[in-house]
Structures are given as structure tokens and as C-alpha cells.
Image: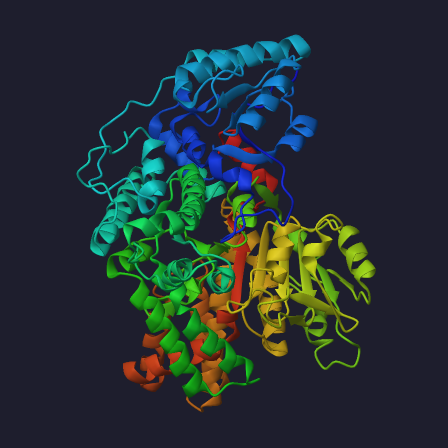
């Protein structure tokens, strides 16, 4: 007998579109815009047949552990009809439409099916129900019918357990809203998350955020994010978290548009009034747009403002559905965070000008960047970031990893990953639920290293030599496979022939300016990774040991984004040039950590998310950079450096948040280093170290280093 999947699939059907047919500011498929209001619907409904049969706290724990997420996806109409019809083993499909023509086609297609999805549409008639009719009881009724239809098509299908669970559904008891400030894009993600666990919408006029004071927006974001984080208080020390580590608990969101898009639109704008509106958008720092216009001018600037507003609503609701899936607290950052791009560009230009940049000047410039970032984030939100216990998810294009938190950039302070907000269609792909990927630590011995330097290049053998004799603490080799493609075809063939978990690209990267895509150099020519989307099958993890694969001061068409578009789950990219010896040292450390630390944690009964493998390797590399700098300055000798490195590594595995302070205390005790000198030294090291030049894109938290026995014991109840 076969049992059907219990997940409920929420499918958003939209018209097909061409790559050049996207929204102007951010690049969404046009058909997504009218679907935006329907994205809130699943938050009030169950994710699967079993959810409403277990206590609410257990439901929340499942979601914090990355299980029981809302399964939703936008799908082109043609793809839906040709490839996505419900199957007996996956019968529970809800299709949502917002366009009359799409609804009509879905309605006709549905009539041809024996196993029928539930159609929900804003368009009346069509054999569909309207959104307001999709209640928990109506969904249960559909599930009963769909399971019986599936059974009639496959007599070997066992639906008894699922039907029994449907009879045990108990809707979450609603409770009044705890929020005062509400009703705006800046709070909608947290409101959806609270609604998903029974909190009613805050619909009172009082507290509704609409053209409010800046401080009210800050308070509203703080209040709603705090309410979500309070949900976690009762979920500590769950056995499930050993094998399914909690997902990031804080999401930092900074909506953005294509780089310099306002300038390009400004150039083609039909009137001075529209140019003025675009200029105001480009300079916006607060949550409201300051624009003075006569009443008769509103009709002229209204359409372009409405289009941008529709983009913001779409992504806010999509992020809300993502946050609700994992009970994450969402902090909407003010547009001021994007206005830091000028000083970020200064830092980038400075660091690109030197192979070994002068430490003191670099520290001053990096401090300018960090100060600009700090000024854009209110203290209340910095406190919320500090409260994170399971990592931070950045959904932005700004350099948020450099935001200073207790003396360290955010990217070193905790485990961080990011989803880019441009282009919009990549954002939507990455926000969708990601399937859990389990990788045994030993599988990282089977990495693929693609070296694409010219043979005479002094960098060509640095990483290869570093990993050639690499072995774990038991003496077992960690060698992987090395290929040296000379053409694009050889590059594609090497990737497609590989069946392991991790690709390491050792190459020159370039992203010349904002007018061209980034590329990897092969044979003196740049490969546009985006163009390979339908030709390569990339492994889940891609490590880009190449310069400028996702620079902050270039356009969205980066190498790293290209690998995301080709299907990678996690891409470690670079925002600046990296140096050969440092890059090789980091790759070596990353491989050792994946194999050794992953194995050690598995032996204690714990899985490890890939975010922690990368975050820990970066922090350990930073500790080594500190010790090396102190040794180079004659402050410590080799023995002392080794001792300090060892003590730092012990604090970092597993991660203690105060490891840097403890390292400073040891230096004070060992050589009398005072606090002022220590702070100046660490600031110098951070600014010039390669560790701030990496950015982790995609959904690496969906990748777990775990032996199968861990899951087998857990699900067997032998914890």
C-alpha cells in the first residue's frame, strides 16, 4: 500500500511572460501583482493534514524546526496545465487566481480532470469559490473529496490515516490582537505570522500605520517583531531541534529597486513632475515618501507610484508567508539603509586599489560604512537583532552584513544568510519553501574543485596545493576531485558529471560595472552563468573562490545570483576581490569544518545547518587573522599565537557570542594589552580581512549535515 502526501499545495496561477516583460523597479512577473492579496490566505489555514491534530505549541515547534512550512508557489499557466495537475500521491492542491483570463482557463482545465484541485478566485463564477469562502471547514471538505478521488484512481492508496486525521481537526482558537500599531507593509509579515497561530487581525482605526510619523513605524515594527519573538519562549529545548535545528529567528528586510533604476527612468520620464517624483524615491530615507505636488498633479504621478507600491505590497506579503512558515520575527529596515551605497562604493574602490590595503586608512573607511549603517537602524532594532538565537536572514541588496553589533560586523556576530531583492523573480523563487537537504559530513570529501586559471597564473595552484594533502584528525584524506576546464562546454560537462554536494570554483571573477553581467573567466573570456540556466545541474552548495561574484556596487546580474537562478540552494559569493592565500586558507578550513565538526556534532546527536559551518569557518578565520596580526606586530610569538587560536576555536565550536571579548581578555592577561589597543587592533583586522568579503546567498539553512541514523532514531522515538 502507498500513502499520499499530506501537504496542502497552494498554487498561484499567473499568465506566462517573457524575460523582458517584468515590472519596472524590481523585475517581477507582471502576473504576480494582482495575486499579491491572495498570498495572505494560507496563513489562516493548515499546512498539511496533520497540523490541526496536534497542540498549538507543537505546531509552532515544527515550524521553527523548518517542518510543516506553507507549501506555496507561483506557477505559469502553461506549466500548470502541462506539468502540475494533482496526482493520487499528491492530491491536495489549492489553485488561486486573480486574473479573469487565467481563472477562465483554470476553470476549463479543472473540468477535464478526474482528480480536481480546489479553485479559489477573485473572479466570480468559473466554478471557483471566492477567497472569503476558503475557511478551515471548507478546506477540510475539499481534502476529504480529493482523498476519495485519489483512492478511486489508485486502489493501492491507503487514505485511512489521513481521513481519520481530518476528523480530528481542531481549528486554532482565535484570540484578540496584541498589537497597537498595525496595517502597513512594514508590519504585515509579523501580523501574518501572528495570524497563523490564531491572533486576529488588528483592525481598529487607532494605531493604523498610514502616513504616520517615522517613530510610529519604528514602534510598530518593534512591537510586532517582539510579539513574534515571544512565541518562541515556550519552545525551548525541544528534542526535534537536535535533528532539525531552528530556522533563523530574525529576518531583516530592506526593499530595493534595480540599481540606478530611478536615474534611468528619470532620463526617459515624460515630464518634470515625474522626474521629481523619481528623484524623491531615489533619495527616500524614511518609511514615508516626502513629495510635494498639487492636487491636479496626482493623476500624472499616480500610476508610477502605484506600480512601485504594488511591488512593495507583493514582496511584503511573500516575505510574510515565508516568515509565518518558520515563526520568524521580521524587521523592516528603513530606505536609509539603501542610501549607504555611496560610502559602500568608496570602500569598494579603496579596497580594489590595493592587494594589501593600508590597515589604518582601511579601518577608517570601513568605520565610515559601519557608522552609516548604524545610523540607518534604530537602537530598538539593534536590540532585536542581538536577541537572535538561531541566526539572521537578510532579504536586501544593501551591505547589511557589515552592520556593527557589539564590536563585530553582523556577518561575524551570528550565522547569516541573504536573499537578494533584485531581480524580483529570483526573490520569489528563493522565498518559496525549500526542501530539506541532508548531507552526511563524509560526503564533503567528494567535493568538486574547478580550477580555471591560465597555467602561468601565479594563483593557479594555491587552492589545489592547500587541499591536495588535506586530511582530517584521523589521517583520512579530504581530496575531492579537481578539473581544469578550458572552455564553457568543458565547464558545463564537469558540473553535470558531478554528483556530490559541493562545487568550489577557483577562478578569476569580474563584474566590470553596472551595465554588464558579472562573469567567471575561462580562456580569457567571461562566462555569463545566467545563460547556462537550462544547461547545467548545479550541486546544492557552490563556493565561489573568485573576486567580485556578488559586489555591492554593481548590478543584480552577479555570478552568485546566476548560480541561484541555475538551482543552487546555497552560494557563498564575494562582494570584493579576495586574495589567493587567504582564499585557500578559508577553503581548507571550510572543508575541515564540514567533515570534522559535522561528524563530531552528529556523534552528540545533533545536526548542523550549513549556515553554521560557513559562519563558524569565517569566525575561526577572523580569529586566525587577529593572532597573525599580533604576531606580525611582534606582540606575541608562535607558541602564544597557537595557544590563543586554540582557545578561540574552543569558544567558537560551538559558538559563544562573547568569544571575541574572551580572546581580548586572554591577550590582556598574556601580554598586558589594554582595551583601547585591543579595540583598535581588531578594528584594523576586520577592515582588511577577507572574512568581510564573503556573502552567503540562498537558503543554506535548508541544508543539514546529518547522518541518516540521527533522523531514524528521532522518528523511531529513540531520542
> In this rendering, is residue 392 above or below 409?
above
Q: Is residue 341 left or right of residue 610?
A: left
For the question of whether residue 239 can be seen, the reply is: no
Colour mode? rainbow
Q: Position of residue 486 (x, y in %)?
A: 82, 67
Q: In terms of image quadrants, where is residue 681?
A: bottom left
Q: Is residue 442 visible?
A: yes
Task: State the residue in front, 297 or 68.
Answer: 297
> Which residue in the rendered view is the most extreme toward the left?
206
Q: Is residue 366 above or below residue 273?
A: below
Location of residue 700 in the rendering, given as x and y in whole percent from the top left corner: 54, 51
Q: Position of residue 506 (x, y in %)?
A: 69, 68
- Does residue 626 appear to the left or right of 188 in the view shown? right
Q: Residue furthest front?
A: 296
Task: Report whether 161 appears left or right of 113.
Answer: left
Quarter of the image with the N terminus is top right
Work out whether residue 231 or residue 628 is closer to the camera in this orientation and state it. Answer: 231
In the image shown, does 691 or 201 lie closer to the viewer? 201
Report the number of discs.
0
Residue 236 is situated, as x and y percent measured from the top left of the image, at: 34, 41
Direction from residue 677 to residue 429 in the image, left or right: right
- The residue lying at 73 percent from left, 54 percent from top is 532
Amino acid at each position: 500500500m502507498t500513502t499520499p502526501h499530506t501537504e496542502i499545495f497552494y498554487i498561484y496561477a499567473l499568465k506566462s511572460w517573457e524575460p523582458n516583460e517584468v515590472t519596472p523597479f524590481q523585475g517581477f512577473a507582471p502576473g504576480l501583482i494582482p495575486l499579491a492579496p491572495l498570498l495572505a490566505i494560507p496563513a489562516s489555514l493548515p499546512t498539511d493534514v496533520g497540523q490541526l491534530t496536534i497542540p498549538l505549541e507543537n505546531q509552532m515547534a515544527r515550524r521553527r524546526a523548518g517542518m510543516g512550512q506553507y507549501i506555496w508557489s507561483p506557477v505559469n499557466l502553461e506549466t500548470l496545465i502541462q506539468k502540475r495537475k494533482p496526482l493520487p500521491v499528491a492530491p491536495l492542491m489549492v489553485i488561486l487566481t486573480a486574473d479573469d483570463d487565467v481563472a477562465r482557463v483554470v476553470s476549463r482545465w479543472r473540468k477535464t480532470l478526474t482528480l480536481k484541485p480546489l479553485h479559489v478566485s477573485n473572479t466570480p463564477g468559473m466554478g471557483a469559490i471566492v477567497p472569503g469562502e476558503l475557511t478551515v471547514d471548507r478546506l477540510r471538505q475539499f481534502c476529504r473529496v480529493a482523498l476519495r478521488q485519489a483512492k478511486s484512481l489508485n486502489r493501492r492508496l491507503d487514505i485511512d490515516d489521513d481521513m481519520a486525521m481530518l476528523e480530528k481537526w481542531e481549528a486554532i482558537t482565535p484570540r484578540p490582537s496584541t498589537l497597537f500599531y498595525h496595517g502597513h507593509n512594514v508590519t504585515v509579515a509579523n501580523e501574518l505570522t501572528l495570524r497563523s497561530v490564531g491572533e486576529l487581525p488588528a483592525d481598529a482605526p487607532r494605531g493604523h500605520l498610514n502616513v504616520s510619523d517615522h517613530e510610529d513605524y519604528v514602534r510598530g515594527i518593534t512591537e510586532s517583531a517582539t510579539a513574534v519573538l515571544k512565541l518562541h519562549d515556550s519552545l525551548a529545548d525541544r528534542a526535534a531541534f537536535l535533528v532539525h535545528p531552528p530556522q533563523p529567528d530574525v529576518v531583516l528586510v530592506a526593499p530595493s529597486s534595480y540599481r540606478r533604476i530611478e536615474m534611468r527612468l528619470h532620463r526617459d520620464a515624460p515630464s518634470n513632475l515625474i522626474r521629481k517624483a523619481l528623484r524623491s524615491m531615489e533619495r527616500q530615507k524614511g518609511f514615508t515618501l516626502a513629495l510635494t505636488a498639487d492636487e491636479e498633479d496626482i493623476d500624472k504621478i499616480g500610476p508610477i507610484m502605484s506600480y512601485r507600491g504594488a511591488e512593495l505590497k507583493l514582496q511584503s506579503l511573500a516575505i510574510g508567508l515565508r516568515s509565518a512558515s518558520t515563526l520568524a520575527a521580521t524587521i523592516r529596515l528603513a530606505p536609509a539603509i539603501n542610501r549607504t551605497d555611496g560610502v559602500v562604493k568608496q570602500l569598494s574602490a579603496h579596497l580594489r586599489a590595493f592587494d594589501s590595503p593600508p590597515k589604518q586608512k582601511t579601518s577608517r573607511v570601513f568605520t565610515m560604512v559601519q557608522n552609516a549603517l548604524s545610523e540607518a537602524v534604530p537602537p530598538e532594532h539593534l536590540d532585536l537583532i542581538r536577541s537572535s538565537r538561531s541566526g539572521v536572514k537578510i532579504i536586501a541588496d544593501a551591505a547589511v552584513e557589515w552592520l556593527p553589533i557589539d564590536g563585530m560586523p553582523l556577518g561575524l556576530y551570528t550565522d547569516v544568510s541573504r536573499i537578494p531583492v533584485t531581480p524580483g523573480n529570483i526573490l520569489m523563487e528563493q522565498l518559496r519553501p525549500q526542501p530539506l537537504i541532508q548531507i552526511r559530513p563524509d560526503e564533503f570529501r567528494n567535493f568538486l574543485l574547478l580550477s580555471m586559471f591560465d597555467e602561468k597564473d601565479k594563483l593557479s595552484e594555491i587552492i589545489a596545493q592547500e587541499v591536495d594533502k588535506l586530511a582530517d584528525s584521523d589521517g583520512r584524506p579530504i581530496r575531492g576531485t579537481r578539473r581544469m576546464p578550458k572552455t564553457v562546454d568543458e565547464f558545463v560537462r564537469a558540473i553535470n558529471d558531478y554528483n556530490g554536494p559541493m562545487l568550489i570554483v577557483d577562478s578569476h571573477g569580474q563584474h566590470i560595472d553596472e551595465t554588464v553581467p558579472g562573469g567567471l573567466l575561462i580562456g580569457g573570456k567571461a562566462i555569463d552563468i545566467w545563460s547556462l540556466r537550462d544547461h547545467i545541474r548545479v550541486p546544492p552548495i557552490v563556493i565561489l573562490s573568485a573576486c567580485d561574484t556578488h559586489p555591492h556596487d554593481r548590478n543584480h546580474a552577479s555570478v552568485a545570483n546566476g548560480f541561484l537562478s541555475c538551482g543552487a540552494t546555497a552560494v557563498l559569493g564575494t562582494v570584493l576581490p579576495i586574495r589567493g592565500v587567504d582564499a585557500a586558507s578559508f577553503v581548507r578550513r571550510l572543508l575541515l569544518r564540514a567533515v570534522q565538526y559535522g561528524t563530531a556534532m552528529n556523534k552528540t546527536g545533533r545536526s548542523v545547518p550549513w549556515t553554521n559551518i560557513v559562519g563558524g569557518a569565517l569566525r575561526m578565520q577572523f580569529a586566525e587573522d587577529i593572532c597573525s596580526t599580533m604576531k606580525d606586530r611582534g606582540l606575541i610569538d608562535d607558541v602564544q599565537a597557537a595557544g590563543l587560536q586554540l582557545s578561540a576555536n574552543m569558544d567558537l565550536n560551538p559558538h559563544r557570542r562573547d568569544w571575541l571579548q574572551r580572546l581580548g581578555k586572554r591577550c590582556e592577561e598574556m601580554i598586558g594589552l589594554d582595551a583601547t589597543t585591543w579595540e583598535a587592533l581588531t578594528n584594523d583586522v576586520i577592515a582588511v580581512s577577507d572574512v568581510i568579503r564573503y556573502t552567503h546567498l540562498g537558503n543554506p539553512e535548508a541544508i543539514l549535515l546529518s547522518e541518516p541514523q540521527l533522523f531514524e532514531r528521532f522518528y523511531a522515538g529513540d531520542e
